[in-house]
Image (cartoon, rainbow, N blue to C red):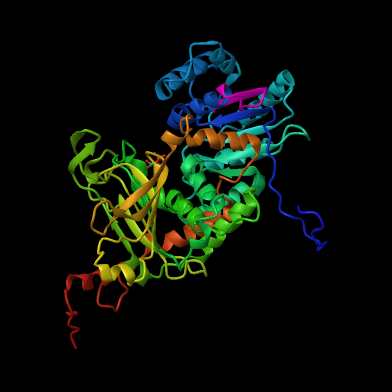
């Protein structure tokens, strides 16, 4: 602070960035024999270990139903890392040391005696490794198991740390609820045993380097913030596209659809980071307060808005490009686990209006879909066109509005499209790009989202996790879209019917 200036004593605490440190703990994994554990969690934990980012001591307790023991689970974990993170050294002393701290506890999820055994085992491990009773409980199970695990953890007293110096944290995987009512019910269940600051709701998009970079790009560069509003920005587009179909997850997807799977969480999280005001500090609550304000400023969808500002679709059979190759793929209704008459949407496009001073009049377009031509997640900030003077008189029709494109994946980075004079004796304008690529600017490879998120749960930094009000507000916005009727009784049918008529034509309203 400059000399001579002091803050007035006005009786409130100044928001400070918190400091988060890793301290010895146990990491208890529910759903330990599942796909997520093998593909993401175990490789992420081992990578953290290799970087020296895990506390010492650190033990993992895998809690699952199948008949395994410490040795067989350690061997399977090694194979999982070999398969899903093949560049990691699983044949050396580092793996052996890491694996020697993995334990397997066999129990079904509904057996209270299993949770008592877990509690005893954790107390033993605390004593053996001198851990102060600190625990992360990670729910990597299907959502239908969440409530019974929470209940049993609470009843076994595992919602509290093993000692006064310790802490207990609960990590909940997505999907968090199915609509507003179920998300509220799940939050209420969690709160029966855990307080909000113990709960870490995962949205793995927030762990992506490029998603975190949105805050840095916006608030660590003076050049963007003055332009970041409806005076200079025409519209914002967020695209979350995948080439994959539902990949054997037909059963799950039938219940979810793309809106629940990718829009309510991933795309809306990206939208809040693009639209939020600068937080008062870089701590979990200050950041999440600003994100919630954005969600609360979004104009709720009425049934008429749903008809006008949303589009949903479903993929049929087609020819899909995967890099260099092209493959015939089946339609959604032919996928395993999918009802042949299913109406579930695999594509959705929405227009959101954020009704606050910064964004009034700037549409936020969001589209997400499976089996689209490329796997790409990008945000495009489209600036307004320059005034129609000066260059317009020179017939410079080629002047395009500036665009800032944030490439979330793949080819992580961002580019700014500006207009430049093309070389030559004539005066011709052409759009050119100022391009930043992570791959070219940094030697370090982009880390996996799970690595960052697990690291943060161990450090106790909840900034990249969704808070209760954030999840509920996002559901409150999305639920009316999911349940909206297509047209109200007593009206002349869906709004979309008007799009059939061209020119000045309008539907004849019979008398
Ligand atoms: C998951 C969805 O949350 O995100 C999947 O359930 C989707 O359907 C996946 O494929 C996409 O994640 P990423 O990190 O590959 O973009």
Q: Residue furthest bottom?
A: 511
The answer to whether 469 appears left or right of 128 in the picture is left
Range of the magenta residues? 50-63
- Taking the magenta stretch, the answer to whether it contains residue 120 is no
Q: Position of residue 195 (x, y in %)?
A: 67, 47
Vertically, is 462 above or below 440? below
Residue 377: percent from left, percent from top: 37, 46
Q: Is residue 443 above or below residue 189?
A: above
Placement of the C terminus among the 4 image quadrants: bottom left
Q: Is residue 232 above or below residue 348?
A: below
Left or right: 278, with 249 as reference point? right
Question: Residue extending furthest front?
Answer: 425
Report the front residue among 12 and 26. Answer: 12
Specify whether residue 345 is in view.
Answer: no
Residue nearer the viewer, 283 or 510: 283
Picture quadrant of residue 57: top right
Q: Quadrant of ligand 1?
A: top left
């Amino acid at each position: 602070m400059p000399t001579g200036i002091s803050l007035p004593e006005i009786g409130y605490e100044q928001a400070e960035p918190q400091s988060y440190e890793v301290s010895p703990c146990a990491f208890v994994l529910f759903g330990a024999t599942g796909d997520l554990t093998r593909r993401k969690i175990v490789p992420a934990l081992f990578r953290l270990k290799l970087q020296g980012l895990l506390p010492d001591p650190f033990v993992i307790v895998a809690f699952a139903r199948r008949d395994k023991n410490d040795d067989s689970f350690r061997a399977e974990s090694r194979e999982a890392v070999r398969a899903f993170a093949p560049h990691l050294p699983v044949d050396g002393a580092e793996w052996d040391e890491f694996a020697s701290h993995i334990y397997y506890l066999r129990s079904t999820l509904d057996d209270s005696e299993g949770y008592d055994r877990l509690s005893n085992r954790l107390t033993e491990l605390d004593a053996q490794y001198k851990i102060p009773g600190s625990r992360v409980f990670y729910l990597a199970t299907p959502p239908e198991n969440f409530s019974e695990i929470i209940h049993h953890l609470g009843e076994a007293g595992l919602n509290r740390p093993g000692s006064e110096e310790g802490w207990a944290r609960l990590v909940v995987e997505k999907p968090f609820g199915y609509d507003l009512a179920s998300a509220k019910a799940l939050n209420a269940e969690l709160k029966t045993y855990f307080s909000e600051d113990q709960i870490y709701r995962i949205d793995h998009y927030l762990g992506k380097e490029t998603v975190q970079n949105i805050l840095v790009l916006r608030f660590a560069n003076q050049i963007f913030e003055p332009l970041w509003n409806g005076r200079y920005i025409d519209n914002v587009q967020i695209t979350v596209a995948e080439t994959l179909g539902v990949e054997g997850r037909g059963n799950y997807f039938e219940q979810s659809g793309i809106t629940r799977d990718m829009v309510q969480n991933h795309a809306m999280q990206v939208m809040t980071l693009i639209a939020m005001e600068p937080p008062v500090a870089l701590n979990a609550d200050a950041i999440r307060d600003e994100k919630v304000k954005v969600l609360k400023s979004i104009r709720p969808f009425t049934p008429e808005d749903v008809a006008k500002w949303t589009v949903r679709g479903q993929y049929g059979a087609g020819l899909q490009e995967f890099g260099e190759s092209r493959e015939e793929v089946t339609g959604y209704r032919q996928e395993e686990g999918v009802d042949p008459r299913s109406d579930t949407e695999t594509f959705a496009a929405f227009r959101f209006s954020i009704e606050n001073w910064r964004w009034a009049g700037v549409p936020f377009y969001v589209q997400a879909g499976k089996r689209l031509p490329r796997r790409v997640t990008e945000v495009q900030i489209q600036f307004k066109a320059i005034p129609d003077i000066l260059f317009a008189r020179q017939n410079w029709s080629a002047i395009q509005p500036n665009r800032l494109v944030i490439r979330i994946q793949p080819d992580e980075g961002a580019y700014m499209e500006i207009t430049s004079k093309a070389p030559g004796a004539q005066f011709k304008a052409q759009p050119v790009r100022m391009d930043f690529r992570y791959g070219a600017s940094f030697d370090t490879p982009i880390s996996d989202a799970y690595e960052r998120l697990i690291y943060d749960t161990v450090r106790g930094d909840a900034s990249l996790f969704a808070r209760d009000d954030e999840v509920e507000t996002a559901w409150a916005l999305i639920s009316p879209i999911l349940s909206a009727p297509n047209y109200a009784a007593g009206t002349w049918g869906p709004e979309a019917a008007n799009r059939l008529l061209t020119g000045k034509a309008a539907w004849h309203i019979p008398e």
